[in-house]
Image (spheres, rainbow, N blue to C red):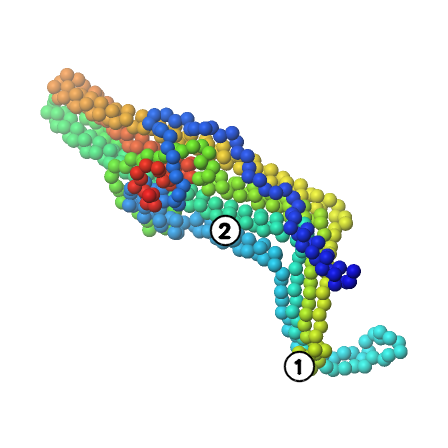
């Protein structure tokens, strides 16, 4: 067999082997045993959310222009989202760099020099003396280097980089979901604090009028000073609550500033008492959460990347083979650089095989295997957490819906009690303590109703986040992008 044929056969065999890759092929993870349906209570029912649109603009379901504007600003200026965007950019650049290893690396070299050779250099032949010379050297060369993917190291490297890039994309989607959910939570907390403040301020007006009334009766000698002192104490206590609620509201406002990338001193949200109710949220099936939640997708892609690392570490046990051909021109006179005698070339193959490393390569494989097992456990943890969060949201909203109806009923009852207590006191049938107690009950029930409303809104945001974002229901749906 001629030498050229031997080289061709060797290259063909190497190319065939390069199609294989050592290490385990990635397989989709087995998920924990998922329930067929959710544990729903009244007024929940199963629905079929669709995934035909982007899951990002779920907040438009609440139909609040101020919330929409804040969300858009947060997605544009929030530092956490910006970090996730930069990480995705890095991951895609890493994928491009890894993919480049599948192709030859070609370089162009140019050299022009004038040099002197020593006449006293060591002899290469005792019968031939050395002479010093001064001459020029002009060279033009084209070099190439190509690693034959003998054990599939490059293939696994590309697989791992692709999975990491997809993981970064899922992390970006998750960062956007978390930031938007955090912003909506603080926004609704601020809004129901506004409602609480309004309740307390209205109670203060009533209590001040009551104080004027009981003071006038005291001046006329109809009641004792105890009634005046009791009403004054109630008013002072309610004024204290105003300051506490304003402090709480300021903290929510500052959180919104940070989430939107705005310095807190330069940010404010005007009070708004517009009534708000959470939208109807279709639950779908438990298995659909795994397709919708970006953190689950990120955990699954992390498994794929870790699996590829096992193949990369295993490939170190096999030879590394590199082709390095070179072609160029070399002449001591530039005018003859491109003449036929100036041509030079070389074709070479280099192979390296580790014979002994004290167990380092095996340790690297074990390390990669351990990393993969960690991602498997993390995937299971994320899935279980997702199931827990959805069930928490379902049970929480069901309980809060019932609590909201009961709170409104309690407000109506406490107002009736206040009217009756005031009438009885004015008629002399009861003491002013009954009126004080009724006033405090009205304040407490109205504040409780406002708090339950805020918790319903916040819990609905929590459930939307747990389900993975927006949806398109199969019924008539006014949300943007739903057909």
The outermost residue toward the right is: 127
- Residues 24 and 302: in front is 24
Total numbered circles: 2
Of the two numbered discs 1 and 2 on the same chain, state the one appearing first in sequence.
2
Mark 2 closeness class: few <14, some 14–19, many ≥20 residues within 10 Å: some
Is residue 255 at all visible to an observer of this figure?
A: no
Q: Residues within 10 Å of mark 1 (few under 14, many from 20)?
A: some
From the top left corner, tell me how far across and down residue 192 is, in percent. 30, 36
Q: Residue at x 37, y 25 (%)?
A: 41
Q: Please give the label number shown on residue 87.
A: 2
Q: Residue at x 52, y 40 (%)?
A: 299
Q: Are marks 1 and 2 in contact (CB under 8 Å)?
A: no
* Cα distance in 3D space between marks 1 and 2: 50 Å
Residue at horizontal 59%, vertical 42%?
26
- Pinpoint residue 405: horizontal percent, then vertical percent: 28, 26
- Foreground mark, 1 or 2, reads 1
Secondary structure under the numbered disc 2 in the rendered image = helix
Give the left or right position of residue 448, taking residue 135 as reference. left
Residue found at x 67% / y 43%: 365
Hey, which residue is sitting farthest left in the picture?
A: 220
Q: Quadrant of residue 284?
A: top left
Q: Secondary structure at mark 1?
A: helix
221 and 111: which is toward the camera: 111
Q: Which numbered circle lies on residue 334?
A: 1
Q: Which mark is residue 275?
A: none
Residue situated furthest front in the rendering:
1
Give the quarter of the figure containing the N terminus.
bottom right
Residue 372 locus on image (x, y percent): 60, 40
| Quarter of the image where the C terminus is located | top left
- In this view, the residue in front, 104 or 390, is 104
Q: Is residue 174 visible?
A: yes
């Amino acid at each position: 067999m001629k030498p050229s044929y031997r080289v061709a056969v060797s290259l063909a065999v190497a190319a065939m082997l390069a199609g294989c890759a050592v290490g385990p092929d990635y397989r989709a993870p087995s998920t924990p045993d998922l329930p067929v349906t959710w544990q729903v209570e009244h007024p929940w029912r199963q629905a079929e959310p669709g995934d035909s649109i982007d899951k990002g603009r779920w907040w438009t379901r609440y139909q609040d222009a101020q919330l929409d504007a804040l969300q858009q600003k947060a997605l544009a200026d929030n530092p956490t989202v910006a970090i996730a965007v930069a990480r995705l950019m890095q991951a895609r650049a890493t994928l491009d760099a890894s993919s480049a290893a599948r192709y030859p690396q070609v370089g162009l070299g140019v050299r022009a020099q004038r040099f002197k050779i020593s006449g006293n250099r060591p002899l290469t032949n005792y019968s031939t003396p050395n002479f010093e010379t001064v001459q020029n050297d002009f060279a033009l060369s084209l070099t190439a280097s190509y690693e034959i993917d003998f054990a599939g190291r490059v293939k696994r490297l590309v697989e791992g980089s692709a999975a990491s890039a997809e993981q970064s994309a899922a992390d970006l989607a998750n960062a956007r979901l978390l930031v938007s959910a955090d912003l909506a939570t603080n926004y609704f907390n601020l809004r129901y604090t506004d409602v609480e403040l309004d309740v307390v301020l209205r109670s203060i007006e009533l209590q001040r009028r009551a104080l004027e009334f009981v003071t006038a009766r005291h001046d006329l000698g109809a009641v004792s000073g105890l009634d005046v002192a009791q009403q004054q104490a109630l008013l002072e206590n309610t004024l204290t609550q105003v300051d506490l609620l304003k402090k709480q509201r300021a903290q929510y406002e500052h959180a919104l500033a940070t989430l939107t990338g705005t310095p807190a001193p330069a940010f404010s949200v005007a009070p708004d008492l517009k009534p708000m109710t959470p939208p109807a949220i279709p639950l779908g099936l438990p298995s659909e959460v795994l397709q919708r939640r970006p953190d689950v997708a990120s955990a699954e892609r992390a498994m794929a990347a870790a699996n590829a690392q096992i193949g990369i570490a295993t490939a170190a046990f096999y030879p590394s083979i590199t082709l390095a051909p070179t072609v160029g021109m070399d002449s001591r006179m530039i005018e003859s650089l491109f003449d036929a005698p100036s041509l030079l070339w070389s074709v070479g193959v280099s192979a390296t095989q580790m014979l002994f490393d004290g167990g380092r390569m095996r340790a690297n494989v074990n390390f990669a295997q351990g990393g993969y097992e960690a991602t498997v456990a993390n995937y299971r943890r994320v899935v279980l957490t997702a199931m827990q969060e959805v069930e928490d949201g379902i049970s929480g909203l069901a309980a809060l819906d019932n609590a909201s109806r009961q709170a409104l009923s309690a407000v109506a009852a406490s107002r009736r009690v206040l009217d009756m207590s005031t009438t009885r006191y004015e008629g002399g049938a009861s003491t002013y303590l009954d009126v004080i107690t009724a006033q405090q009950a009205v304040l407490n029930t109205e504040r409780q109703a406002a708090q339950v409303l805020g918790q319903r809104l916040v819990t609905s945001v929590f459930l939307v986040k747990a389900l993975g974002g927006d949806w398109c229901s199969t019924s008539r749906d006014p949300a943007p992008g739903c057909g």
